[in-house]
Image: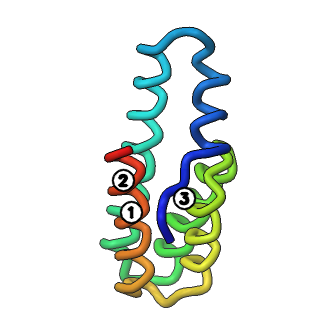
């Protein structure tokens, strides 16, 4: 699932207003938060830790209207802890968003 500009960028822009530096700061904070949850997913070995990281990622995605990431987070909730395909898909999304 590829990153698509849209609601997420609009949400960040609305929060930052005319302040370009704030926009970049908010964007970086979002990336770092996603990366933290992805790291927790990678290290999760039990259902509870996996589910908690997936729910946090879902909440983050929902808060910023990142629809594609939200879908991935929902898939993650139902996946087995350590499921490599879902982790790779989230990493790909994060890499594409970070590079955009």
Foreground of the two, 67 or 50: 67
Measure the alpha-carbon separation of dots 1 and 3. 8 Å
SS class of the residue under badge 3? helix
Q: Return the disc, 1 or 3, that comes first in the chain's sequence.
A: 1
The residue positioned 36% from the left and 66% from the top of the image is 92
Asked whether, in this view, residue 84 is left or right of residue 81, the answer is left
Q: How crowded is mark 3: few (under 14 residues within 10 Å), some or many (20 or more)?
A: many
Residue named by callout 1: 38
Asked whether, in this view, residue 87 is left or right of residue 3, the answer is left
Q: How crowded is mark 2: few (under 14 residues within 10 Å), some or many (20 or more)?
A: some
Where is residue 17 shown, x and y percent of the image?
A: 62, 14
Residue at the limit of the structure toward the top, as seen here: 18
Foreground of the two, 82 or 13: 13
Tags 1 and 2 touching, CB below 8 Å: yes
Q: Return the disc, 3 or 2, that comes first in the chain's sequence.
A: 2
SS class of the residue under badge 2? helix
Where is residue 44 shown, x and y percent of the image?
A: 37, 75
Asked whether, in this view, residue 83 is left or right of residue 11, the answer is left
Measure the alpha-carbon separation of dots 3 and 2. 9 Å
Q: Residues within 10 Å of mark 1 (few under 14, many from 20)?
A: many
Residue named by callout 2: 35
Tags 1 and 3 touching, CB below 8 Å: yes
Residue named by callout 3: 57
Measure the alpha-carbon separation of dots 1 and 2. 5 Å
SS class of the residue under badge 1? helix
């Amino acid at each position: 699932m590829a990153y698509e500009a849209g609601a997420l960028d609009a949400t960040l822009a609305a929060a930052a207003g005319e302040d370009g530096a704030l926009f970049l700061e908010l964007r970086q904070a979002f990336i770092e938060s996603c990366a933290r949850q992805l790291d927790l997913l990678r290290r999760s070995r039990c259902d509870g830790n996996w589910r908690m990281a997936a729910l946090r990622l879902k909440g983050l995605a929902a808060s910023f209207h990142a629809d594609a990431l939200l879908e991935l987070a929902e898939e993650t909730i139902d996946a087995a802890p350590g499921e490599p395909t879902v982790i790779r898909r989230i990493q790909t999304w994060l890499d594409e968003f970070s590079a955009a």
